[in-house]
């Protein structure tokens, strides 16, 4: 069954940690590869700085179940800078996960609620302030 999900990882000084995730690896539970996006892309510089590092990936199937635990297990140089944004195809907005006490946990966003949904790895994140009849 096809199911789309987008994931963005933001982290400072994490090139070494994320670089292996930009290459295929049959030993991982999930198989898509992240693409690095850095500030050099926006200003045309050939050498990006340390201040702007983001990695993005889009999953087209349910094959990313182990991703969040994998990211949690990595040796981040600055764990407090790690932010993982996830938007499953039925979500109204991206959910935010951050590392607290060594664990990657979802940070509650104002005016949202997450409900379990078996077809989704994370469940469905809905905006509670949407007007009746308004669609995401």
Image (tube, rainbow, N blue to C red):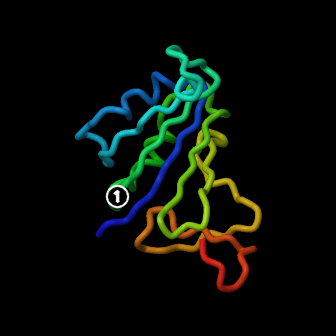
- Which corner quadrant of the image does residue 111 belong to? bottom right
Residue occupying the point 50% across, 63% down: 122
For residue 42, above or below residue 91: above
> Helix or strand or loop: what does disc 1 sit on?
loop
Q: Residue at x 52, y 14 (%)?
A: 47
Residue 9 in the image, given as x and y percentages of width and height = 53, 40
Is the C terminus in the top left, top right, bottom left or bottom right quadrant? bottom right
Residue 27's place in the image compared with 133, above or below, is above
Q: Is residue 80 left or right of residue 123?
A: right
In the image shown, does 25 or 131 lie closer to the viewer? 131
Outermost residue toward the left in this view: 26
| Front residue of 1 and 115 | 1
The residue indicated by pointer 1 is 60
Is 94 placed left or right of 18 in the picture? right
Q: Residue placed at 54% from the left, 70% from the top?
A: 124
Residue 52 sits in quarter: top right
Callout count: 1
* Observer-nearest of 7 and 45: 45
Name, please, the residue furthest toward the bottom.
Answer: 132
With respect to residue 44, does 80 lie above or below? below
> x, y (%) of residue 123?
52, 68
Q: Please give the name of the residue rendered at 49% of the width and 49% of the height, measured from the top-left corner.
A: 7
Measured as percent of width and height from the top left, residue 93 is found at: 61, 61
Outermost residue, front side? 44
- Label 1 environment density (alpha carbons within 10 Å; few <14, some 14–19, many ≥20): some
Q: Please state if 65 lies on the left or on the right of 83 as rendered.
A: left
Question: Which part of the image, by quadrant, shows the N terminus?
Answer: bottom left
């Amino acid at each position: 069954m096809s199911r789309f999900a987008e994931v963005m990882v933001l982290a400072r000084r994490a090139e070494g940690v994320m670089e292996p995730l930009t290459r295929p690896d049959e030993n991982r539970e999930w198989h898509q590869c992240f693409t690095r996006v850095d500030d050099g892309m926006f200003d045309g510089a050939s050498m990006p700085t340390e201040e702007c590092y983001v990695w993005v990936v889009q999953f087209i199937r349910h094959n990313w179940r182990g991703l969040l635990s994998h990211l949690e297990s990595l040796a981040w140089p600055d764990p407090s800078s790690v932010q993982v944004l996830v938007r499953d195809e039925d979500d109204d907005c991206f959910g935010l996960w951050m590392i607290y006490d060594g664990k990657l946990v979802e940070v509650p966003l104002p005016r949202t609620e997450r409900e379990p949904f078996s077809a989704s790895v994370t469940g469905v994140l809905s905006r509670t302030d949407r007007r009746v009849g308004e669609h995401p």
